[in-house]
Image: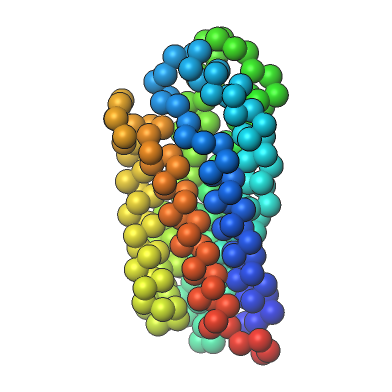
């Protein structure tokens, strides 16, 4: 039997988590290119140290709330007939991996703000490693978004535009993983996609949470 109280709390969690995640993504500003000089990267971390520390701190509850939303969403999508759970397992695994990689990435960035080695040659390597974990996290989130959108579409369990938005997030996140290859330009490893991709993903979580809240009855 489905837990309606859990599903509604997951919807509220998704709303809160999405808002916190959007704030955390915006307050640090646009990061410099991963191919930038040690001085450029160190200057960014020094100038935005406080904002990056706050961003890292906000990411922790944001990830926890979104993870709870993912579990509640798949509980809702399970349906009363206990349908095939393959997509739900895959999507839940993607959400868990995304959460782990996000926490690891912000922990690394927070560590850099605590002890910034200035022009040290090690800082660019740590910075790129942070971004690569973030990019791979987007790939894991793509699995979550696709599983949720596809299962919701199959069961007609969510509004069609929410499902279409989920497919769009899947495409955007997958394309973002390809940014580890270009060396320069807006699609480089730390171009505009570094900020736009998490924002699109978080906005989908926000609207999917509202849709879930509208679909789950208050009792039952």
Q: Which quarter of the picture shows residue 66?
A: bottom right
Q: Residue at x 50, y 28 (%)?
A: 129
Q: Residue at x 59, y 45 (%)?
A: 24
In the rendered image, the vertical position of residue 61 relative to residue 131, given as above or below: below
Residue 150: in sight, yes or no? no
Residue 12 percent location from the top left of the image: 64, 69
Q: Nearer the viewer, residue 171 or 74?
A: 171
Question: In the image, 38: left or right of 175?
Answer: right
Question: In the image, 217: left or right of 192?
Answer: right
Q: Which quarter of the picture shows residue 72?
A: bottom right
Q: Nearer the viewer, residue 30 or 167?
A: 30
Q: Nearer the viewer, residue 142 or 56?
A: 56
In the rendered image, the vertical position of residue 134 relative to residue 141, given as above or below: above
Q: Nearer the viewer, residue 73 or 168?
A: 168
Image quadrant containing the C terminus: bottom right
Residue 195: in sight, yes or no? yes
Residue 100 percent location from the top left of the image: 59, 45
Residue 54 percent location from the top left of the image: 67, 39
Query: Residue farthest to the bottom?
Result: 220
Q: Coloring scheme of the render?
A: rainbow
């Amino acid at each position: 039997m489905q837990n309606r109280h859990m599903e509604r709390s997951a919807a509220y969690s998704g709303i809160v988590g999405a808002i916190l995640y959007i704030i955390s993504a915006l307050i640090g500003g646009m990061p410099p290119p991963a191919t930038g000089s040690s001085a450029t990267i160190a200057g960014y971390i020094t100038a935005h140290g406080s904002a990056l520390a706050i961003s890292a701190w906000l990411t922790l509850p944001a990830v926890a709330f979104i993870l709870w939303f993912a579990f509640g969403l798949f509980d809702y999508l399970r349906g009363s007939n206990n349908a095939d759970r393959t997509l739900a397992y895959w999507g839940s695994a993607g959400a868990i991996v995304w959460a782990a990689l996000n926490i690891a990435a912000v922990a690394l960035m927070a560590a850099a703000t605590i002890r910034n080695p200035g022009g040290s040659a090690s800082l660019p390597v740590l910075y790129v490693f942070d971004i690569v974990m973030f990019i791979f996290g987007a790939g894991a989130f793509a699995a979550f978004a696709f599983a949720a959108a596809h299962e919701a579409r199959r069961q007609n369990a969510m509004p069609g535009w929410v499902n279409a938005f989920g497919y769009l997030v899947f495409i955007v996140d997958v394309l973002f993983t390809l940014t580890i290859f270009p060396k320069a330009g807006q699609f480089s490893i730390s171009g505009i996609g570094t900020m736009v991709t998490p924002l699109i993903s978080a906005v989908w979580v926000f609207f999917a949470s509202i849709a879930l809240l509208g679909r789950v009855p208050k009792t039952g």
